Amino acid sequence: MKIIPFAVLTVLLAISCRQKPKTGEKHSGTTQAVNYPEEKEAAFDERMAWWREARFGMFVHWGAYAVPAGRYEGKEVKSAGEWIMRNAGIPVEVYEGYAREFNPAAFDADEWVSRMKDAGMKYMVFTSKHHDGFCLWDSGLTDYDVVDFSPYGKDILRALADACKAQGVKFGLYHSIIDWHHPDAHADTYAGGEASENNERRFADYLENYLKPQLKELVEKYDPAILWFDGEWEEEFTHEQGLDLYQYVRRLKPDIIINNRVDKGRQGMQGMNKGDSDYAGDFGTPEQEILDGTSDLDWESCMTMNDTWGYKTDDNNWKSPAVLVRNLVDAAAKGGNYLLNIGPDAEGRIPEASVKSLDAIGAWIKVNGEAVYGTESPESGYQQGENIRFTRKRGTPFYYAVTFEKPGKTVRLEQLKPEEGSQVVLLGYETPLEWKYDEEKGLEITVPEEALNAIGDTQGWTFKVKAGA
Ligand code: FHN
């Protein structure tokens, strides 16, 4: 008789016991399908509540790749900075040299977190380990980490987790399934060597004896609110292993939130799951793009400020603050979160252009943040043309229309019908505005010059309207 390994058996049992999702039931194909078959929609909603309220987070890609900063043998290596090991074909022993140099003397966790907080970001997702395998905490599973291998010698995750806690923001971890450094995780093929035999068995060993114990360390030591997996496209990694990994992490911390890259469901950069199976994961992950419309599932769009995730000296293709604010609002209007990346340099400094953008977003958020936090996509529609987006404060009659074009003397909003006698307000200007409503033309708001002057330069003007259900 064939002996079924315990881990596989657990997965099979979980799959066979799960409740079949009802048609149209939100999220039923994700969490209920895996280790928590009893997790009803209400429990899922409760677990996701803070994340949905937050809407805006900071991604941080930081590691040994900040040392070469996108350059190898005197030349720029095309594409993202954190991929330099693979894209320049740098052998493991040579790449280790960057980790040996990693000594970010200017790193200040409190400063990073307060910058992020000032920008209006409510959570951080930080790279505990990217594809290069270098670990940013003191791992008991390897010496290839910032404490044992690098001159810096201090635990970066500890500093960030503590700073986030002290400043009241959520701390999440990005963790790569792919590992170009670990010999059993296919390091040989990535570093230009021969593909080894028994890759599947070796990869399974790596998962059981390295990746999972590392995740246990991370959860136990740093209590992350999110585990954000990546690198799930690795050939040897299977759907069953993805389900098992999801189960494993939820068991370590039942209320943790896990992205869909824990499993094999993601459809390329669009980021949402394929519909052909019950893939694990609590939210979809569009990358460098925002969904074209809304979704029944939760999602978060992750994006760079220039064209790289990890620091790269040669990349100066910065998005303007106006584009970043527009993206944030566009995502919120379609019911998604926005996870905006910074790639600090090898010293631990956030690039100046990113700092400027964070400040500009923060200034906009201070006035207009209520149009983003705790909102959902309105049933009456999320857009009017290219330049207006709508959000609705979840469970309330308050709607927000953000226009990215400076209003003229009047603004017409076709999809909103204010409650009789209610006030229409332009955020940042205290006096309520005059308005009239016409069944055919919709809502017409009068915008006094004085209001626009009071607001001054901005990336978006927000009208708040109390509208009938
Ligand atoms: O390969 C990575 C990339 O370096 C970066 O981490 C992004 C962030 O979502 N994800 C991967 C590609 O999907």
Image: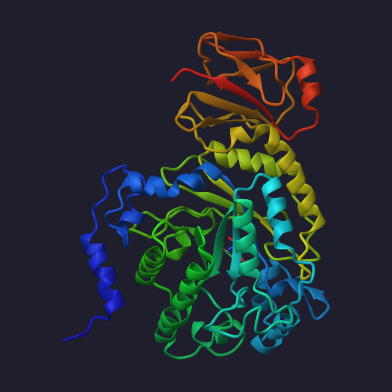
Residue at image coords 42%, 84%: 205
Residue 249 % position (x, y)? 41, 66
95 is higher (above) or lower (below) than 374: below
Residue 370's quadrant in the figure? Answer: top right
Looking at the image, residue 437 lies above or below residue 19 = above
- Where residue 134 sits: x, y (%)? 62, 78
Front-most of 359 and 437? 359
Residue drawn at 65 percent across, 66 percent down: 159
Residue appearing at x 35%, y 48% in the figure: 43
Q: Is residue 204 left or right of residue 423?
A: left
For the N terminus, the quadrant is bottom left
Q: How is the image coloured?
A: rainbow
Horizontally, is 433 left or right of 312 in the view?
A: left
387 or 97: which is nearer to us? Answer: 97
Is residue 374 positioned above or below 15 on the image? Answer: above
In the displayed structure, 368 sits above or below 118; it is: above
Q: Is residue 394 visible?
A: yes
